[in-house]
Image (cartoon, grey):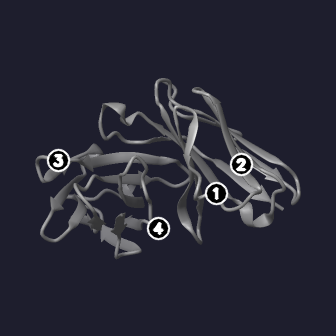
Amino acid sequence: DAGVIQSPRHEVTEMGQEVTLRCKPISGHDYLFWYRQTMMRGLELLIYFNNNVPIDDSGMPEDRFSAKMPNASFSTLKIQPSEPRDSAVYFCASSSPGRGVNEQFFGPGTRLTVL
Amino acid sequence: AQSVAQPEDQVNVAEGNPLTVKCTYSVSGNPYLFWYVQYPNRGLQFLLKYITGDNLVKGSYGFEAEFNKSQTSFHLKKPSALVSDSALYFCAPYDYKLSFGAGTTVTVRA
């Protein structure tokens, strides 16, 4: 398996622009997680899905952030409009705890820079 | 509620010396605990987990962790550290989601 795939790997944009981050989870995994990592705040869970349904979005910082999972093999995290404080590394992870307590597999991340 | 604490922001050891990264937990019910490692400019990688059973858990890259219920700890250990073990280490409780803290930065000097 190719693992969790994220695109783009790097994104540089200007304040006010819309940014869309993409994630393809490992096939067969029914949980998908979006995290944000910054030096100041560490690794934060933004939202997670189970069977394509958002379960907990309490970590989404504000209405500018939205996430969707239209099918089992694809998810997006959108920021509109983007701000410089959104600059961070965004990770997607997937897991399949249906058979027990299983680890999450992380993608390589998307490094977002908002100028 | 599930939470962990990693009391040390940084750990510095010499190559070949034992490495310990501390983690204490506060969970309700049975604790499910994970250790992850993040190498520079990479995503997190799973090291090991405790669910139940043996208190000594063996994981990847020669790491192990000891679950201690009386001390509510789950310290990560490696008998002989390598320079390549230099990374950011996270202890995390599991409740269908993982709650990561700031982690502990490990630096192994040659």
* Residue in the picture at 25% in, 45% down: B59
Indicate the chain on which mark 2 is placed: A
Between disc 4 and disc 1, the foreground one is: 1
Between disc 4 and disc 3, the foreground one is: 3
* Residue in the picture at 37% in, 42% down: A103
Q: Please tell me which residue lies in front, A59 or A27.
A: A59
Indicate the chain on which mark 1 is placed: A
The percent position of residue A84, horizontal first and vertical second, equals 79, 65
Instruction: Kindly report the distance in space between the C-alpha atoms of the residues bearing marks 1 and 2.
Output: 8 Å
Q: Which residue is mark 3?
A: B52
The reply to whether dot 1 and dot 3 touch (C-beta < 8 Å) is no
| 1 or 2: tag closer to the N-terminus | 1
Task: Determine the image quadrant of residue B93.
Answer: bottom left
The amino acid type, in three-letter code, at marker 4 is Ala
Q: Residues within 10 Å of mark 1 (few under 14, many from 20)?
A: some
Residue A66 - label: 2
Q: Kindly state the secondary structure of the residue where label 4 is placed.
A: loop
Instruction: Tell me whether marks 3 and 2 sit on the same chain.
Output: no
Instruction: Tell me whether marks 1 and 2 sit on the same chain.
Output: yes
The percent position of residue B3, horizontal first and vertical second, equals 36, 65
The reply to whether dot 1 and dot 2 touch (C-beta < 8 Å) is yes
The amino acid type, in three-letter code, at marker 2 is Ser
Residue A14 versus residue A78 in the image, above or below: below
Residue A60 - label: 1
Residue B102 - label: 4
Indicate the chain on which mark 3 is placed: B
